[in-house]
């Protein structure tokens, strides 16, 4: 029987309210140092763990809807304000750093495997989990599930759910880490920002949405999503998000569309809504209930991601000492393109929004291959 805490309208209202609270909190002296992106995750995670809204173990269709529709459309809207000139200089560094981050993921998984020895607790499932985590920490959940399906791992209900719970917790914690990394690293090693040739700063007046802009943006967002979905059905090998991003990039070059007011504001709001669900999925109790298996998964995954971060910072710092760009790249690996965009917005690096999308797509392409490679190695 549905309770009021499961009602989709109540949950949606609470998610929206968390965005309101986070944006206001980010305007305070203390909150300004943290940022609205992190605050909305933390606030919503508290609500979910207090059982005031559903969490991962009792998820509702609303959450899936936000993951399926809202997150991709938020990327589309943010891309409408991006000029292709913005990646002339940021493109190559982002790709190189992303490849470094992907290599760091594989190194982290393999080293953590030999240090933690999860196979002693997980048995043969350990190698599959290692491959799944390699996939998701290179590209995303698409790669995670591709490897799981190959080995029918989704049929192992409790262990599959536990792995997802651990992934959610570690991913959420890593968002906190990547937000805090740049100011922390600057105290030890001064950075040099990689400047884009044409930083796509969006003027304040362009954020003032009117009826004319809203009706066009609503139409464009839904139509682009539908067109991308049709393309996915016709050409399954082409990633959906790549098609949607391409449409957004092409439309952004049309003066009439690029001048529509409010696309950035609308996109950023939808990103915050997506991040709120990420916070709701950070369910500590689901990990605790697995006891020894949960502890092993948490230790293995946490150490692998920590090693990824260390290798990415060290190797990335030698290549391009831009701590904000390195943090965004690491987040693109661990959390995916949408959270990487949120990081770029938090750092006011709008010129890195499009590169973050592009490397996120690259991660989707590489993740499954690297995941299967790790399974084969182990």
Image: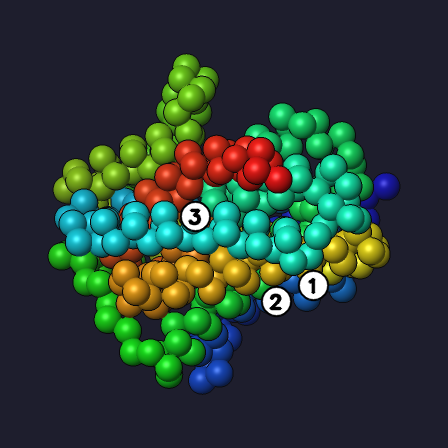
Q: Is residue 323 left or right of residue 18?
A: left
Query: CB under 8 Å between callouts 1 and 2?
Result: yes
- Disc 1 crowd rating (10 Å Cα; few below 14, some 14-19, many 20+) is some
Q: Nearer the viewer, residue 78 or 162?
A: 162
Q: Which residue is mark 2?
A: 43
Q: Is residue 128 above or below residue 328?
A: above
Q: Is residue 274 left or right of residue 33?
A: right
Q: Which residue is mark 1?
A: 47
- The local secondary structure at tag 2 comes to helix
Q: Is residue 122 left or right of residue 67?
A: right
Distance of label 3 from label 2 (alpha carbons): 30 Å
Residue 138, how many percent across, how many down? 47, 45
Residue at the extreme right of the image, as rendered: 1
In the image, which disc is placed on residue 134? Answer: none
- The local secondary structure at tag 1 comes to helix
Distance of label 1 from label 2 (alpha carbons): 7 Å
Location of the C terminus by quadrant is top right
Q: How is the image coloured?
A: rainbow
Residue 268, how many percent across, how many down? 40, 55
In the image, which disc is placed on residue 102? Answer: 3
| Between discs 3 and 2, the one toward the N terminus | 2
Residue 236 makes an appearance in the image: yes
- Residue name at image x 23 percent, y 49 percent: 92
Distance of label 3 from label 1 (alpha carbons): 33 Å
Q: Is residue 96 above or below residue 324?
A: above
- Residue name at image x 29 percent, y 34 percent: 246
Q: Nearer the viewer, residue 105 or 323?
A: 105
Task: Tell which tag, 3 or 2, sits nearer the viewer.
Answer: 3
């Amino acid at each position: 029987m549905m309770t009021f805490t499961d009602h989709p309208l109540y949950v949606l209202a609470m998610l929206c309210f968390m965005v309101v609270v986070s944006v206001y909190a980010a305007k305070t002296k203390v909150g300004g140092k943290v940022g609205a992106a992190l605050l909305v995750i933390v606030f919503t995670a508290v609500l979910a763990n207090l059982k005031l809204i559903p969490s991962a173990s009792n998820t509702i269709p609303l959450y899936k809807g936000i993951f399926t529709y809202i997150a991709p459309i938020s990327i589309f809207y943010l891309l409408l304000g991006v000029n292709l000139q913005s990646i002339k200089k940021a493109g190559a560094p982002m790709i190189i750093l992303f490849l470094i981050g992907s290599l760091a993921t594989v190194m982290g998984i393999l080293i953590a495997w030999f240090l933690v020895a999860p196979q002693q607790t997980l048995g043969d499932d350990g190698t599959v989990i290692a491959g799944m985590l390699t996939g998701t920490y290179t590209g995303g959940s698409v790669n995670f599930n591709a490897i799981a399906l190959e080995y029918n791992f989704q049929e192992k209900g409790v262990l599959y759910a536990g792995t997802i719970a651990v992934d959610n917790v570690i991913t959420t914690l890593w968002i906190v880490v990547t937000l805090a990394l740049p100011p922390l690293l600057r105290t030890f090693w001064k950075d040099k920002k990689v400047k884009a040739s044409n930083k796509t700063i969006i003027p304040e007046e362009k954020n003032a949405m009117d009826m004319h802009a809203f009706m066009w943006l609503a139409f464009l967002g839904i139509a682009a999503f539908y067109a991308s979905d049709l393309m996915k059905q016709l050409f399954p090998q082409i990633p959906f998000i790549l098609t949607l991003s391409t449409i957004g990039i092409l439309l952004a070059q049309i003066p009439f569309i690029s001048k529509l007011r409010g696309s950035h504001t609308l996109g950023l709001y939808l990103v915050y809504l997506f991040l709120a669900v990420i916070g709701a999925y950070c369910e500590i109790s689901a990990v605790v209930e697995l006891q020894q298996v949960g502890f092993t998964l948490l230790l293995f995954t946490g150490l692998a991601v920590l090693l990824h971060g260390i290798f990415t910072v060290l190797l990335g710092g030698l290549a391009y000492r831009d701590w904000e760009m390195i943090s965004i790249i690491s987040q693109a690996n661990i959390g995916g393109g949408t959270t990487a965009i949120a990081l770029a917005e938090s750092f006011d690096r709008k010129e890195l929004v499009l590169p973050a999308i592009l490397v996120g797509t690259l991660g989707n392409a590489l993740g499954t291959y690297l995941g299967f490679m790790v399974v084969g190695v182990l």
